[in-house]
Amino acid sequence: MIDLSSFTDTIVLCVGDVILDRFVSGDVKRISPESPVPVLLATGEQTLPGGAANVGRNVVSLGGKCILVGVIGDDAAGRELTNILAEGDGIDPDMVTVSARPTAEKTRFVSQGQHLLRLDREKTHSLSVEAEDAVIGAAARHIAGCHALVLSDYAKGALTDRVITETIALAKNIGVPVVVDPKSPNLSRYDGATVVTPNMSETVAAVGLSPVTDALAEEAGRIALRDAALDSILITRAEHGMTLVPRDEGATHLKACAREVFDVVGAGDTVVATLALALGSRRPLEESARLANVAAGLVVGKRGTATVSRSELLDELGRISLIETGQSATKFSSPHGLAERRKQWEADGLTVGFTNGCFDILHIGHLHTLEFARAHCDRLIVALNGDESIRRLKGPARPINGVDDRMRMLSALTYVDAVVVFHQDTPAEVIDLLQPDVLVKGADYAVGDIVGASTVLARGGKVLTCPLLPDRSTTGIIKKAQIA
């Protein structure tokens, strides 16, 4: 079972260039008579925290907590960004206001998912000594309570050489891993970092070599590590995947996970946020890179400055493990482990359904019930009687199939999001623990007789009965087989 519950206890300090991202969407139906350019009829506008602030959004979306240190101007954009961050949950902003420079702002004009134009408002000169002192002081106030440091460099001036050097030193002095999303071609600026994450163009600028193949990517990584005092480098290679090159170990090449690519805006933020959470929760570097690779594949399938939730990441990890090993690494769980995941589903706004049974010989009647249940919820938990539980209910000749086989069969179904085994005669304890929103049983039960109905109804949930398919039962199948 893949467990990301430790993300909840992980606090990431993110220092860098905060940006106000604005998206103006609309329709283009004609060309301007004034000049040969499209006319965008605006129909909507969305404003989101971008840059280092989007790293914070990704940390929170994945279940962690983020302390955000950045620089804003004494202007309307700075106040708007501050208000957006204050309204969110999980990001603790500690902004340094510098009246002499505007808040960095990017406005993208989009029609039918296509970017027409981007308008930037910014000044990218380096901070004054006083502003540097304020940023370093903010980082120093928070670092002791954090588990990872991210330096999010968008080349807007907040991460000066001094800010970078001193914040990395603060983290290294207490053993906190440092993840850097670099913008400078001089990677030695980030000396002391645990891992830097340049993309393909940034890698070319840094080492003069394009990482288009695995071999070239590894060579580029070795050159970077030769010229800079970094522990490792993770080169993000778009459709070519990622290459992780640690200083003292062999390279790892990760295939791209994206099924569809709609928008790459903010994908680097997702990578460093996932890396930081994984490293901060004491996962090995290679495992952390694999998680970041999967998260990046999810976020590029979304439009705009998007994030990935922990539920989405777990679901995708389960899908990948099913493809690679023939069994899901995310669908089996203990009751208490599943309770933590159920809380995350609730935090993501997903309704959780529950049904239970022996599922001894899987047949069309079972599939009918599972399909019905999944149609009434976003995530479906199936509670499975253990072998001894079935023997007490059905007799010593049952089950026909052991619990491990039955779990594997159920987990292979797309209707099913989690399988949990109970060993009592009824699933009452599991239902009390998991508190589902929807409880489903076959129509041969009256609602008042369904175990757990009172628990679900008491919390405002629904209890549904699924119409039965005639002459479809495990008992009937066994009788037919005995006659034959």
Image (tube, helix red, strand yellow):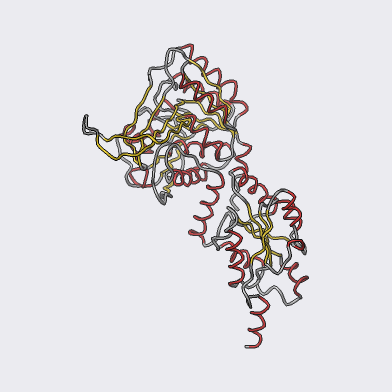
User: In which quadrant of the rendered view does residue 67 lie?
Assistant: top right
Residue 171, given in percent of the width and then of the height, sits at 55, 27
Q: Is residue 28 left or right of residue 454?
A: left
User: In which quadrant of the rendered view does residue 401 lie?
Assistant: bottom right
* Rendered position, 181 above or below 358: above
Q: Residue at x 51, y 39 (%)?
A: 274
Q: Residue at x 51, y 14 (%)?
A: 133
Q: Which of 127 and 354 is in front in this view?
A: 354
Q: Residue at x 55, y 58 (%)?
A: 328
Q: Nearer the viewer, residue 345 or 68?
A: 345
Q: Which of 275 and 243 is in front in this view?
A: 275
Residue 260, given in percent of the width and then of the height, sits at 40, 50
Q: Can residue 318 be seen in this view?
A: yes
Q: Can residue 218 be seen in this view?
A: no
Quarter occupied by the C terminus: bottom right
Residue 54, given in percent of the width and then of the height, sits at 48, 33
Q: Residue at x 76, y 76 (%)?
A: 396
